[in-house]
Amino acid sequence: MRAPPPEDDDAHFDLKDFLPYLLNIAGEVTSSGFQSSYKNQYGMTRTEWRVLFHLGRYGDMTARDICARARTHKTKVSRAVSALEKTRFLKRHKDLEDRRFETLCLTPEGYKAYKALCDKARQFDRALSAQFTAEENAILRRCLRQLADLP
């Protein structure tokens, strides 16, 4: 049995031009390209890399802070924190005033991994950006920061 022909409005809609779809596919393609850097060398997941990055870049913080900054669900961050603790890349410190909260910080091994991965991220970013002119890069980054509501 054949599908009914599309209505006129549907005929003009093409998923390949739907911005959320394009952003998702572009994000997946580029993210999976960098994935080998943290997965092969350190066995990390994407969320673990993001937690490591936030602690390395912004210093000690709570898991809640990381969730807000990285816009990642608390369950994923919690799993990533546990995994990074097992690999001795981070430590938890109980808040002395409110024992319900823990401050997370990188260990020296975690900071070393952070620095190495930042170098790889810079190289990956340069290679990815090389397909665009300087003007295209500036426009692309400005538009993506605007969509992501980033400063």
Image (tube, rainbow, N blue to C red):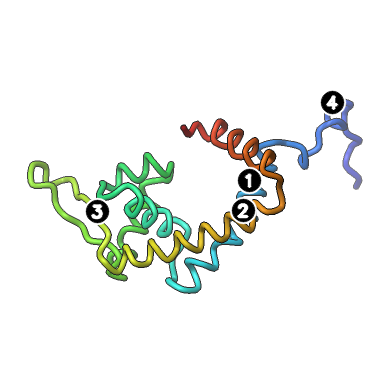
Left or right: residue 55 versus residue 45 is: left
Q: Earlier in the sequence, mark 2 or mark 4?
A: 4
Q: In the rendered structure, which amino acid carries the disc numbered 2? A: Glu
Provide the residue designation for mark 2: 28
Q: Where is residue 83 shown, x and y percent of the image?
A: 34, 65
Measured Cα–Cα span from mark 2 to mark 1: 6 Å
Measured Cα–Cα span from mark 1 to mark 4: 24 Å
Measured Cα–Cα span from mark 1 to mark 3: 30 Å
Q: Earlier in the sequence, mark 1 or mark 4?
A: 4
Which picture quadrant has residue 139? top right
Provide the residue designation for mark 3: 104
What is the crowding at mark 4: few (fewer than 14 residues within 10 Å), some, or many (at least 20)?
Answer: few
Q: Earlier in the sequence, mark 2 or mark 3?
A: 2
Q: In the rendered structure, which amino acid carries the disc numbered 3? A: Leu
Is disc 3 placed on a helix, strand or loop? strand
Measured Cα–Cα span from mark 2 to mark 3: 28 Å
* In this rendering, the label closer to the viewer, 1 or 3: 3
Provide the residue designation for mark 1: 24
